[in-house]
């Protein structure tokens, strides 16, 4: 099967050049983040597919935080956010909540499904401290990273153990469970968005 054959070729390359493959992959992720290219979802799934899930979760989270810090300073030095209507509208809805509990609201901001660059722009708009930015970003993105890397790991395990892969083979616990977790996470994040972040204060 072409998919399984290509998978074997990729695994052979990673086995032959483990350090270059691993760090090259995450340097690519960091480059995409630094250029404000929204590719993290695919990167997380691919990381879980190619590497050990624990390493994938840890390094995906850390790379996202580092890329976010680069975004943070790029936006801070380059853009005039006071002139950005979208950022201003979102910021007004969050202003009182951030004043009450900055760290909690930053975590919620990372949990809601919105563009990473817009989230970073909000943190710059409110002049968030770098320390709060780093820790809240790590905690807030961790559930998403775990779920997506787990989906990638489940696909890897499925391809390795199944000959003649069909759609029915995708209906198994290792695939369905993280997808259900993802659905629950989306629902919870939307509730948080409505109740905590987007309400009029």
Image (cartoon, rainbow, N blue to C red):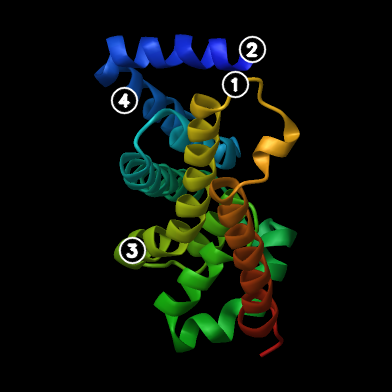
N-term mark: 3 or 1: 3
Mark 2 is surrounded, within 10 Å at the Cα level, by few (under 14), some (14 to 19) or many (20 or more) other residues, namely few
Instruction: Identify the residue position indicated by label 3 in the image.
Output: 135
Instruction: Identify the residue position indicated by label 1 in the image.
Output: 163
The span from disc 3 to disc 1 (Cα, nearest Å) is 43 Å
Instruction: Identify the residue position indicated by label 2 in the image.
Output: 1
* CB under 8 Å between discs 1 and 2: yes
N-term mark: 4 or 3: 4
Q: Residue at x 60, y 78 (%)?
A: 94
Q: Is residue 28 left or right of residue 54?
A: right
- In the image, which is nearer the foreground, mark 3 or mark 1? 1
Which disc, if any, is residue 17?
Answer: none
Q: Is residue 63 visible?
A: yes
Q: Is residue 2 left or right of residue 16?
A: right
Residue 15, horizontal then vertical, whole percent:
31, 15
Residue 177, horizontal then vertical, whole percent:
57, 56
Q: Secondary structure at mark 2?
A: loop
Which disc, if any, is residue 23?
Answer: 4
Q: Quadrant of the N terminus?
A: top right
Q: Secondary structure at mark 3?
A: helix
Against 12, residue 81 (above or below) is below
- In the image, which is nearer the foreground, mark 2 or mark 4? 2
The span from disc 2 to disc 4 (Cα, nearest Å) is 29 Å
């Amino acid at each position: 099967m072409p998919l399984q054959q290509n998978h074997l070729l990729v695994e052979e390359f990673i086995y032959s050049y483990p350090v270059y493959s691993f760090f090259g992959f995450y340097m690519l992720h960091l480059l995409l983040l630094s250029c404000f290219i929204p590719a993290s979802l695919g990167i997380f799934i691919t990381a879980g597919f190619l590497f050990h899930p624990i390493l994938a979760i840890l390094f995906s989270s850390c790379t996202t935080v580092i890329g976010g810090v680069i975004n943070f300073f790029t936006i801070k030095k380059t853009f005039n956010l006071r002139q950005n209507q979208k950022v201003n509208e979102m910021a007004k809805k969050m202003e009182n909540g951030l004043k009450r509990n900055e760290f909690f609201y930053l975590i919620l901001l990372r949990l809601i499904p919105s563009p990473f660059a817009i989230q970073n722009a909000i943190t710059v708009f409110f002049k968030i401290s770098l320390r709060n930015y780093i820790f809240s970003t790590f905690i807030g993105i961790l559930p998403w990273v775990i779920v997506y890397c787990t989906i990638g790991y489940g696909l890897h395990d499925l391809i390795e153990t199944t000959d003649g892969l069909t759609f029915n083979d995708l209906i198994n616990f290792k695939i369905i469970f993280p997808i259900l977790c993802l659905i629950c996470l989306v629902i919870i994040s939307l509730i948080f968005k409505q109740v905590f972040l987007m309400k009029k204060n």
